[in-house]
Amino acid sequence: MTRVTLIKGRELEDLLKPEILIPEIEQAFIKYSRGETVSPPRTVMWIEGNWWGVMQSYVPGYGVGVKVVSLIPQNPSRGLPSIQALVVLFDEIMGSPVALMEGGILTALRTGAASAVSVKYMAPSELGPIGIIGTGFQARYQLKFIASVYKSDEVVIHDLRSDAARSFKSWAEGIGFRVLEASSHEDLVRRSRVIVESSTTREPVILGKWLDKNQHVVSIGAHATNHRALDDEALSRFSKIVVDSRKAVLEETGDIRVPLEQGIIKIDKIAELGEVAANVRKGREGDELTLFKSVGLAIQDACAATLAYRLAKTKGLGIEVEL
């Protein structure tokens, strides 16, 4: 009979600490950019205006992961997270399922780790506030992981939902951050050194005219080909644009697709995070304005899920069930 380990979201948080997950995710990106992974394009469907995806990947040394995920922007008003998911991990040799885990928290953890890898290689030389646009579920993981490599304890936040901003502020202050509330997106951008866009916006919330040199922007929103989190001027001003996958961002986000089609940026300006981590392409050089644009890759799920499974077995966590 097949035996599967069930791993709860709270257990994932205990297992996948920043110092453990970040270097593993970095290696997964290197393997991806070297062409060593198997990672078909995700299957996407829209239901009642909401995004659903099926993501699968094989990462050598980790395993095969399959995730079913939904993004429902209205869910916070229902008391539910906007991103919900399940991840199944399979043995790559025998094809047997070995683990099933909560995927929303796994997604937030691996996304935070990817952002932290970008900050590791492109953080401004000057220490300053971390600005966060959109203080929902993902934002907490973005702050925790980014602050583990960019040692700022000051956070500037802005969210059109005042209740989300209050909740985030209370949480962040509870773990030692000094939290300042910006009056607008512009105010936040001008006051921050590392800027995180973790919203569900469809229109630009970061404009080029607000940006300054020696800043790094992390954008994890705008997940559709006609959605934008950054305007054309912002894209034209970045001296380095780094993405998780050139192929994925061209297919999935207007932030890269539209400026490329309009000739505002050129494809040779775009590097992959795995190339930067492997020193094939350069990270920050001096007081540059840099961008990491991420749509999320299945390799991150396979990597994080395998690591969580191995650690859970070692520490006696998870519940083993017979199917």
Image (cartoon, rainbow, N blue to C red):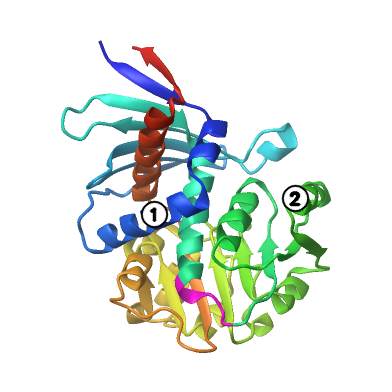
x 66%, y 84%: residue: 209
Q: Which mark is residue 25?
A: 1
Q: Position of residue 90 (x, y in %)?
A: 28, 31
317 is within the stretch colored magenta: no
Give the answer, above or below, for where 190 lies relative to 302: below
Q: Position of residue 93 (x, y in %)?
A: 16, 33
Q: Amino acid at mark 1?
A: Ile
Residue neighbourhood size for the residue with mark 2, other residues' Cα within 10 Å, grouped as few (<14), some (14–19), many (≥20): many
Q: Which residues are magenta?
A: 121-125
Quarter of the image with the C terminus in it: top left
Q: Position of residue 270 (x, y in %)?
A: 38, 75
x 75%, y 47%: residue: 171
Front residue of this view, candidates 178 and 87: 178
Q: Which mark is residue 168?
A: 2
Q: Is residue 45 visible?
A: yes
Q: Amino acid at mark 2?
A: Phe
Give the answer, above or below, for where 65 lies relative to 272: above
Where disc 2 sits, the SS reads helix
Q: Is residue 225 visible?
A: no
Front residue of this view, candidates 58 and 171: 171
124 is within the stretch colored magenta: yes
Answer with the quarter of the image where residue 137 lies.
top right
Q: Which mark is residue 235?
A: none
